[in-house]
Amino acid sequence: MAYYRRRWISRAMSVLTLGCAVLVLAPLFLVLGFLMRTGASAINLEFFTALPGPAGEPGGGMANAIAGTLMLIALAGALAIPLGVLGGVFLAEYPNARLTHLTRFTADVMNGVPSIVMGLFAYVLVVLPFRHFSALAGGVALGVMLIPMVMRTTEEIVRLVPQSVREASLALGVPQWKTILRVIIPTAAAGIVTGIMVGVARIAGETAPLLFTAFGNRFWNWDPLKPVAALPLQIFAYAISPFDDWHRQAWAGALVLVTLVLLVNIAARYAASRQVKLR
Amino acid sequence: MTSIVAARAAPAAAQSGDRYFRWLLIAMAAAVPLIMGAILAVLLSAGWPAMQRFGLAFFVTSTWDPVAREFGVLPFVYGTLVSSTLALLIAVPLGLGVAIFLSELAPGWLRVPVGFLVELLAAIPSVVFGLWGIFVLVPWVRATLTPLLKSSLSFLPLFAGPPLGIGMLTAGLILAIMVVPFIVAVSTAVMRAVPITQREAALALGATRWETTRTAVLPYARSGIIGAIFLALARALGETMAVTMVIGNVPQIKASLLAPAYTIPAVIANEFTEATSDLYVAALIYAGVVLLIVTVIVNVVARVMVGRVARGLAPIRE
């Protein structure tokens, strides 16, 4: 085959794969464009301050759902952050232990377990014994999803801490546990927090595991043992409702949710790129 | 005197502190396998009544009748498998194209932004895709795509029936959008893990960039790419919200891709809170257990295949 022909094929493949990239990214811009067009017109102060209105009547907001999502995140974080960070430190500091291989592999597999299954787990574990839906159950479902994410990112970041930092601390006679808590974790803190934020952004948008755990609530609730509203649940309920005004609120809710998720991801990306430059 | 005692005691205290702290870390790390085991055990025991009652006939029975307390998941299994297959048929070629672009062919300045945008696509919550599906994709499928398919491919039974907009095809499309970032991310990573010497060897023999990709990179990364596809499959099988919002939720087995269908995650999401009898709940949990076991197996296979390339153990064939 003549060289110019082969070179032409190579260039054609570059263009073709670029076309794939354009096609794959098109939905991202279509979704964002749709949300900006519809959500921006539906969003107002009432959306952030009011309770949901009665069915079919215009007005009302999602204040309780936003608060509920924050509460669920707090519960999930309380479960997952200590476990994930300390477990991740173990994976990084004891790379050859048999438990390290088992945990790392299981964490990766757990990351792929469907979120609805986590909801079933939390239902049987928390809802059945208490005999009613609760924020706690939703927090457990989301927390169990968050653990492997936090653990794996913590591991990656702690591994980046230079060996010389550990040695310097140990050489000063600082015991290993203190070295980990006072030297290694603070050194890696920025990266660990970034990892937690990205994980939280992911669980904040989860709907399926909350359907039969947090369940949703049309009123304020601060009791972890009672059902609580959540932003994604409210979006889902409103999206499949027959009312135009509720559709508008679902768009507004989705715009808020996506804005938060994207901001966190962009901030994390920025933080990560700065860290690479500093090294 | 006391200072000497203190100096001697300090290392001992430090050592015991180390020991306790190590046990704490071990407990935290061991929690993950324990939780995974607990998920399996808890769901198996909760679904046990249905497993005992229906056994394996559960998967080949089409009756889903809560009133008569008869449960079979064949239509849901069918819907799950077909919608996921459809998603992969669309997502795999596109995702591989993007991965090849990002890892081999793209100019340097394009790689980071395109890679980042694909990451953002993965970050959009499922329910938002579902919302967009209801208000944009479904009308588009109904008004544009269906007439197009009917006018060109109407002889196929795949495209028979009224243009509803909701149905298997729409679910496959939205699933494809949602799983493609996973294919891109993992395939790009395994292709970047291919040693640079492999590429240099091909380039030194006079291969063009595409020929290098085809003859040196792709064969080396093959098992990792298959792993990436498996990961995407697991995601597609378990995806709940977006699918349930556009697939129509009708438990039926129709040859037409335009007909509504139902999936296992969707039926759990829609019926769990309404399940009145214990057997009904157990049947839904049984379906969930099956979903869990299948996705875990698919994930394990995927991890093993990706790990093979990442560790540089990929067998070099051809």
Image (cartoon, coloured by chain):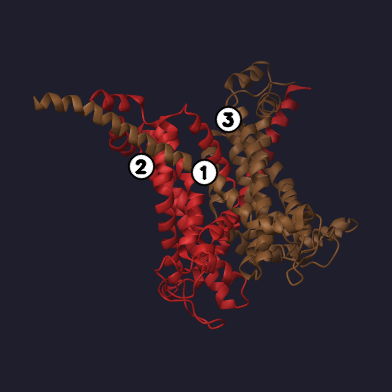
Chain colours: A red, B brown
Residue lying at 46% horizontally and 48% vertically, measured from the top left: A198
Question: Is B168 positioned to the left or the right of B190 in the image?
Answer: right
* Crowd tier of the residue under label 3, counting other residues whose Cα lies within 10 Å: few below 14, some 14–19, many 20 or above: some
Residue lying at 23% horizontally and 25% vertically, measured from the top left: A172
> Distance between the Cα atoms at labels 2 and 3?
27 Å
Instruction: Name the quadrant containing residue A35.
Output: bottom right
With respect to residue A213, does B224 lie above or below?
A: above
Counting residues from the start of the chain, the first of labels 1 and 3 encountered is 1
* Quarter of the image that includes the C terminus of chain A: top left
> Distance between the Cα atoms at labels 2 and 1?
29 Å
Instruction: Name the quadrant containing residue A241.
Output: bottom right
* Circle on res. B192: 3
> Distance between the Cα atoms at labels 1 and 3?
34 Å
Q: Mark yes or no: residue A36 visible.
A: no
Q: Nearer the viewer, residue A274 or A214?
A: A214
* Circle on res. B34: 1
**Badge 2 element:** helix
Q: Nearer the viewer, mark 2 or mark 3?
A: 2
With respect to residue B13, does B95 lie above or below?
A: below
Residue highlighted by disc 2 = A190
Instruction: Say which amino acid is labelled 1.
Output: Leu
* Circle on res. B99: none
* Quarter of the image that includes the N terminus of chain A: top right
Q: Position of residue B314 (x, y in %)?
A: 65, 24
Question: Is B132 positioned to the left or the right of B260 in the image?
Answer: left
* Crowd tier of the residue under label 2, counting other residues whose Cα lies within 10 Å: few below 14, some 14–19, many 20 or above: some
Instruction: Say which amino acid is labelled 2.
Output: Ala
